[in-house]
Amino acid sequence: MNFVEILSNMHVSLCCGANPPFTHICEFDKNKIDSEIMNKISNEETLKEFSIEYLELFKKKYPSIPYGSVHYNNVPWVIFVYNSILKKMNDAPDDVTITYPNGCCPKKDCPINLFYDLVHAKIFSK
């Protein structure tokens, strides 16, 4: 196992519990959710396509970010967005914010948070 793989696994595992060490908050409006994108993410095959597409967008938008957890495996971060939206729709669909887990840090410019922002913007594009 290389260092980035260990780091990525640690970041993901820290997000899997009920209380991740850090979070990223975005605006939430249930009326702006694009159900086609949510359906795409819910399917394993199209999830991989979506993840690859958004990794490429991430790398183009942030070329100076060093290879890290998002580059190594961005699929878990897309799944965390998807699961957070489902939970929000079940628990508090009228809230105006949504919280995504982050096992790295609370900084706005954390690569995980920047990736979350890209995926979030696509899902809430309706």
Image: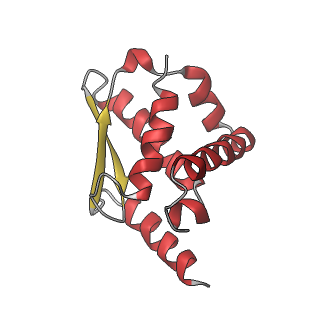
Front-lying residue, 32 or 94: 32
Residue lying furthest right in this view? 45
Q: Can residue 19 be seen in this view?
A: no
Q: Residue 5, relative to residue 51: is it above or below? A: below
Question: In this orientation, which residue lies closer to the viewer: 108 or 84?
Answer: 108
The residue located at (24%, 26%) in the rendering is 95
Q: Quadrant of residue 45?
A: top right
Residue 85 coordinates in the image, percent (x, y): 42, 34
In this rendering, the answer to whether 117 lies above or below 62 is above
21 is higher (above) or lower (below) than 54: below
Q: Which residue sits furthest front?
A: 64
Quadrant of the drawing holding the N terminus: bottom right
Q: Which residue is drawn at 34% across and 33% down?
A: 88
Judge from the rendering whether residue 55 lies leftward or rightward of residue 101; answer left or right: right
Residue 77 place in picture, x, y as percent? 50, 52
Q: Residue at x 49, y 22 (%)?
A: 125
Task: State the image quarter where residue 74 is shown.
Answer: bottom right
Spot occupied by residue 11 in the image (x, y as percentages of width and height): 43, 67
